[in-house]
Image (tube, rainbow, N blue to C red):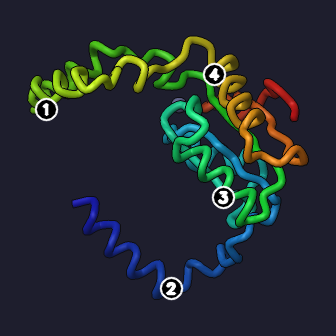
Amino acid sequence: MLLDDMLTYNEQFVKNKAYEPYQTDSLPNKRTVIFTCMESRLIELLPKALNIQNGDVKMVKNAGAILRDPFDSVMKSILVAIHALKAEQVMVIGHHDCGMSHMDQDDFEQSALDKGVPSESIHTLKHAGIDLESEFKGFNAVEDSVQESVSVIRNHPLLPSSIHVHGLVIDPDTGQADLVTRG
Ligand SMILES: [Zn+2]
C-alpha cells in the first residue's frame, strides 16, 4: 500500500539525515510567490527549469492556476506570502496541455455519479444556487487564463503597488517558459 511504503521510506529518510541538503528557513530566499497548476509533470520540472531551490519561493497551487475570486484561498495565500513572509513579487505560471483547458462539465458530473455521489446531492447544490458549471469552469487559451489570474492579483485592494506580478506559461515536457505579461 502506498501509504505504508511512504511511511517506511520516510523512516529511512529521516534516519539517514537525507533532509540535510534541504534545510532552510521559512522566508522565501528569492522573495517570490509562485502560483501554478497542481500538474504532476511540473512537481520537479518547474523548479528545475526555473532554477528554484528548496526555500527559494512560496508555492501556491490549484487546478489550472485559475484565480477568479479576489477572496478565495489562493489570493489569501498570496497576500500572506507578501504581508507576513516578505515576498516582493508574484509569478502566475500556467502550462500548455492543462487538464483545465478541456474541462467537460457533463463528464465531471457523470464521474461523480459513477463514483456513487447521489444525484440528489447534485440537485441540492444546484437548487442552493451553486453553479457547478462556473465553479469548475476551465479555460480555452492558457495565456488568457494566466492574464486573468494576473489581473485579479494586480487589482486586489490589499496588494501594495510595489509588488510586481508576472504571468508565464510553461511547457510541461521541455520546461520552456514563455512570458505572457511582465509586472
Ligand atoms: Zn494544469
Label 1 CA crowd tier, 10 Å (few <14, some 14–19, many 20+): few
Residue 85, percent from left and from top: 72, 65
Give the left or right position of residue 33, taking residue 70 as reference: right
Label 2 packing within 10 angstroms: few (<14), some (14-19), many (20+): few
Q: Mark 3 Cα within 10 Å, few/some/many (few <14, many 20+)?
A: some
Q: Mark 3 — residue? A: 80
Q: Is mark 1 within 8 Å of ligand 1?
A: no
Disc 1 marks a residue whose amino acid type is: Val
Disc 4 to disc 3, how far (Cα)?
23 Å
> Can you tell which of label 2 and label 3 is closer to the viewer?
3
Q: Which of label 2 and label 4 is nearer to you? A: 4
- Residue at the image position 41 percent from the left and 25 percent from the top: 136
Q: Which residue is mark 4?
A: 145
Which three-letter amino acid code belongs to the residue tagged 4?
Ser
Secondary structure at badge 1 equals loop
**What is the C-alpha distance between the residues marked 1 and 3?**
35 Å
Of the image marks 1 and 4, the number of the one nearer the N terminus: 1
Q: Which residue does the image show at 48% across and 35% down from the upper left?
A: 63
Residue at horizontal 58 percent and vertical 78 percent from the top: 19
| Amino acid residing under circle 3 | Val
- Report the amino acid beneath label 2: Asn
Q: Which residue is mark 1?
A: 117
Question: In the rendered picture of this protein, how many numbered marks are placed on residues?
Answer: 4
Tell me which numbered mark, 1 or 3, is placed earlier along the sequence.
3
Q: Earlier in the sequence, mark 2 or mark 3?
A: 2
In the displayed structure, 23 sits above or below 150; it is: below
Mark carried by residue 16: 2
Quarter of the C terminus within the rendering: top right
Residue 93 or 1: which is nearer the viewer? 93
The answer for how far apart the CA atoms under marks 2 and 4 are is 43 Å
